Image (spheres, rainbow, N blue to C red):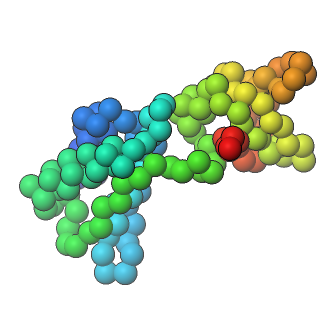
């Protein structure tokens, strides 16, 4: 467990040094190699330079301490992508002010600007003058940012 805590600390430090937010980190085996996949984000969007900075920081640190990931590994650093479903409270809070499409367990789909989010509810401003709606998070089957092109 100490190794995992040290790895988590390094990932957090890498993100802080690049001024990005960690969205998700996942370690899994792909064939004979382990893969450490990291998704990062920031309000203005993630650039290739952001991914490169996090990758170089982590790669250098992991090379100095081979016990953190034993054997061969692949390191992947990227943005979560525009169509990634929002899951955690942190995901919702990062996307306040953006237009969301929320599929509900009631069968209804709602689209609106995310005004607020907490552990219990999402508050959306509906299009036009339709007002606001509070959606219990327990009713949210999926929520994604609506991409404007």
Q: Whole-percent x and y of residue 124?
A: 76, 26
Disc count in the image? 0
* Residue 1 place in picture, x, y as percent: 27, 51
Q: At x 26% / y 69%, what residue is drawn?
A: 73
Question: In the rendered image of this protein, does residue 23 appear above or below residue 43?
Answer: below
* Rendered view: 90 above or below 64: above
Residue in the picture at 15% in, 51% down: 61
Classify residue 84 as left or right of residue 5. Answer: right
Q: Position of residue 138 (x, y in %)?
A: 75, 38
> With 32 as the anchor, is 26 left or right in this view?
right
Q: Which residue does the image show at 80% across and 45% down from the upper left?
A: 103
Q: Nearer the viewer, residue 101 or 117?
A: 101
**Which residue is situated farthest in the bottom direction here?**
31
Residue positioned most to the left: 64
47 left or right of 66 in image: right
Q: Quadrant of the C terminus?
A: top right
Determine the image quadrant of residue 17: top left
- Percent x, y of residue 89: 58, 33
Q: Quadrant of residue 135 in the image?
A: top right
- 96 left or right of 15 in image: right
> Of 57 and 141, which appears nearest the observer?
57
Residue at left offset 46%, top offset 49%: 79
Q: Is residue 117 visible?
A: no
């Amino acid at each position: 467990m100490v190794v995992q805590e040290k790895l988590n600390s390094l990932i957090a430090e890498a993100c802080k040094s690049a001024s990005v937010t960690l969205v998700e980190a996942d370690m899994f085996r792909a064939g004979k190699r382990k893969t450490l996949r990291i998704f990062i984000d920031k309000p203005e969007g993630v650039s290739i330079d952001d991914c490169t900075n996090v990758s170089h920081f982590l790669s250098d640190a992991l090379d100095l301490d081979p016990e953190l990931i034993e054997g061969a590994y692949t390191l992947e650093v990227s943005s979560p992508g525009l169509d990634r479903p929002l899951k955690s409270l942190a995901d919702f809070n990062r996307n306040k002010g953006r237009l969301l499409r929320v599929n509900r367990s009631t069968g209804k789909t709602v689209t609106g600007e995310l005004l607020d989010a907490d552990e219990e509810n999402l508050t959306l401003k509906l299009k036009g003058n339709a007002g606001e709606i509070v959606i219990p998070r327990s009713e949210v089957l999926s929520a994604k940012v609506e991409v404007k092109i």
